[in-house]
């Protein structure tokens, strides 16, 4: 049973998340040959201020990117 965990910045719509879940599931099914019911996709929304790289918060480093 494949489990795919996606960490991304908060702010995506429910429709965008639905599309991500469907497309990731389809890719796993196509690649692994397992039934789609066996695929689990977990999306964790992480606020930009809780994410950092290079010593800088992403809320400041990427303030113009959603």
Image (cartoon, helix red, strand yellow):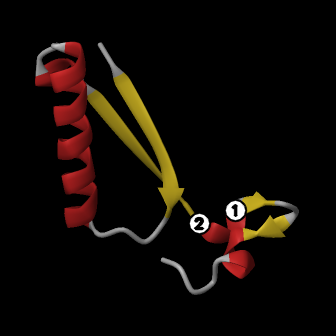
Quote the CA–CA distance across marks 1 and 2.
5 Å
Residue drawn at x 83%, y 69% as measured from the top left: 56
Q: Left or right: where does residue 40 sit relative to residue 38?
A: right
Q: Nearer the viewer, residue 16 or 31?
A: 31
Place residue 12 in its image quadrant.
Answer: bottom left
Q: Label 1's element?
A: helix
Figure quadrant of the N terminus: top left
Q: Left or right: where does residue 27 sit relative to residue 5?
A: left
Residue drawn at x 77%, y 59% as measured from the top left: 53
Place residue 39 in its image quadrant.
Answer: top left
Disc 2 designates what residue?
47
Place residue 46 in its image quadrant.
Answer: bottom right
Residue drawn at x 29%, y 28% as measured from the top left: 40
Q: Left or right: where does residue 26 sit relative to residue 2?
A: left
Measuring from the top left, give residue 18's x and y in whole percent.
Answer: 20, 54
Marks 1 and 2: CB-CB under 8 Å?
Answer: yes
Disc 1 designates what residue?
50
């Amino acid at each position: 049973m494949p489990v795919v965990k996606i960490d991304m910045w908060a702010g995506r719509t429910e429709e965008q998340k639905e599309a991500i879940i469907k497309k990731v599931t389809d890719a796993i099914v196509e690649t692994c040959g397992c039934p789609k019911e066996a695929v689990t996709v977990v999306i964790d929304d992480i606020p930009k201020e809780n994410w950092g790289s290079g010593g800088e918060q992403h809320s400041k480093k990427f303030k113009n990117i959603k």
